[in-house]
Image: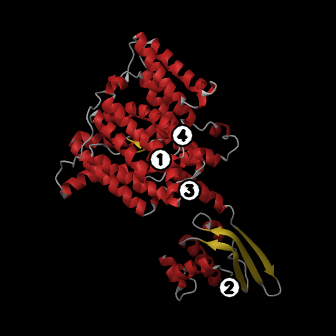
Amino acid sequence: MSPFAKKLKSAWLSNLRGDLLAGMVVALALVPEAIAFSIIAGVDPKVGLYASFCIAVVIAFVGGRPGMISAATGAMALLMITLVKEHGLQYLLAATLLTGVFQIIAGYLRLGDLMGFVSRSVVTGFVNALAILIFLAQLPELTDVTWHVYAMTAAGLGIIYLFPYVPKIGRIIPSPLVCILSLTVVAVLLGLEIRTVGDMGDLPDTLPVFLWPDVPLTLETLWIILPYSLPLAIVGLLESMMTATIVDDLTDTNSDKNRECKGQGVANIFSGLLGGMAGCAMIGQSVINVKSGGRTRLSTLSAGVFLLILVVFLGPWLSLIPMAALVAVMIMVSIGTFSWASIVNLKKHPLSTNIVMIATVIVVVATHNLAYGVFVGVLLAALFFANKVSHYMAVESSLNDEENVRTYRVLGQVFFRSADKFVAAFDFKEVLEKVVIDLTHAHFWDITAVSALDKVVIKLRREGTEVEVIGLNEASTTIVDHFGVHQKPDAVNQLMGH
């Protein structure tokens, strides 16, 4: 078998049954979400459904994370409300195209590599916040309803968690699919008066068609859509990168984050051209896919294809699915998504790690904006890290009485957080012939550290002490030579100027 054939089989055909069944489950779960997100954004349900179909199909081919589901999402829909209200659907389609362009540019700029700066505590907080939001999103379906809905939801959860224990078939057929099909049959046979998918909105009965946004190609249009496209691109990439990281962990595999950035952009451009809204990766549906057995690109493709078939050709049957069945599936997702180990680890982990995780959860849940939560989490993690590293900087000194020479040995990292500690370690009033500053085991990181070294050297010289700096490593020498002033004429005045 040729290398190309092996790669094709691995990416598409290595898990046929699991991928097709998982895709079917995901497609059923995508329908109410796509309709709900369309309503949030203020557009017709078919805009969200077409977007979900298109994005899922395209990302299956061009994405960097096999088995991850991308479609219309609530996080993106929340950012579209004002644009749709003030300018209408056509400007939303134009903004979707520009969002895709920004994401492709981000991929070529390798911004996906920035995920390396997101700490594990931020990812855990992100996951827990999404689990809470997924659960909260189900509460409207469980409020002011008859007892039948609660009974159906409880029965659905029972099927989901108990069916895998049924001998032989329990591990072959995904339990969420069994839940949806069985509860639909029960609701139809008993004629239960409960909310169904059909009550969410009218389903489209035609295939999507190519549609160039009907907006003038002017700078005025650009200034209208730019304030929306940029946040959409950022939030979409953040959620997609985070979801890719989570799916990496669930499947013990790695993914190409920069390819995923470009793939999300291409998918959004296709979505905008087919009358759909901007979307991104969905953690809930991605978890459903993985837990239902989906692993390769085929699962993502089949989810999109099944969605289109369900909506366009099997709409009357699809509309019979009780929302209680889908609520049960989404509650399963929220339970499976939440990192329960993070609760236990609150006692084991450092306080700073816990604060970062909890802050990320609180901000995301409070604002329903993933970007805000991740930004706060990354900022706090960076501050705590800088504070922790600063404690590993120390200055030791020894005195040679015969020559009246004191040697200061600096160990650790000198940067903006530890610079004051570095300066405070020197005694500028001690009468000495010479001071040697040994930096063999130190590293200078920024101009604040260089300024601190300048301050120490110049103060000692001002007291009449000869100063010798030794042991600078190559990287530190480069930054000190470039930004330092203590070796230059008129050093005092230059330092004051800095």
The mark lying in front, picked from 2 and 3, is 3
Task: Look at the numbered disc 3 and give the secondary structure of its residue.
Answer: helix
Q: Find disc 2 in the rendering and name its residue.
A: 468
Task: Look at the numbered disc 4 and give the secondary structure of its residue.
Answer: helix
Counting residues from the start of the chain, the first of labels 1 and 4 encountered is 4
Task: Look at the numbered disc 1 and give the secondary structure of its residue.
Answer: helix
Q: Is residue 356 visible?
A: no
Query: Residue 357, image x and y in percent?
Result: 57, 44
User: Which is more toward the observer, 92 or 129?
Assistant: 92
Q: CA distance from mark 3 to mark 4?
A: 32 Å
Task: Decide: is 22 above or below 154.
Answer: below
Query: Residue 319, image x and y in percent?
Result: 35, 24
Query: Residue 291, image x and y in percent?
Result: 55, 36
Which label number is shown at residue 382? 3
Q: CA distance from mark 1 to mark 4?
A: 12 Å
Q: Which residue sits at x=64%, y=62%?
A: 390
Residue lying furthest top: 190
The quarter of the picture where residue 35 lies is: top left
Q: Are marks 2 and 3 in contact (CB under 8 Å)?
A: no
Q: Which residue sits at x=73%, y=75%?
A: 409
Q: Find disc 1 in the rendering and name its residue.
A: 297
In the image, is 216 to the left or to the right of 66?
left
Q: Find disc 4 in the rendering and name its residue.
A: 290
User: Which is more toward the observer, 57 or 437?
Assistant: 57
Identity, as a three-letter code, of the amino acid under mark 4? Val
In the image, is 346 to the left or to the right of 266?
right
Q: CA distance from mark 3 to mark 1?
A: 35 Å
The mark lying in front, picked from 4 and 2, is 4
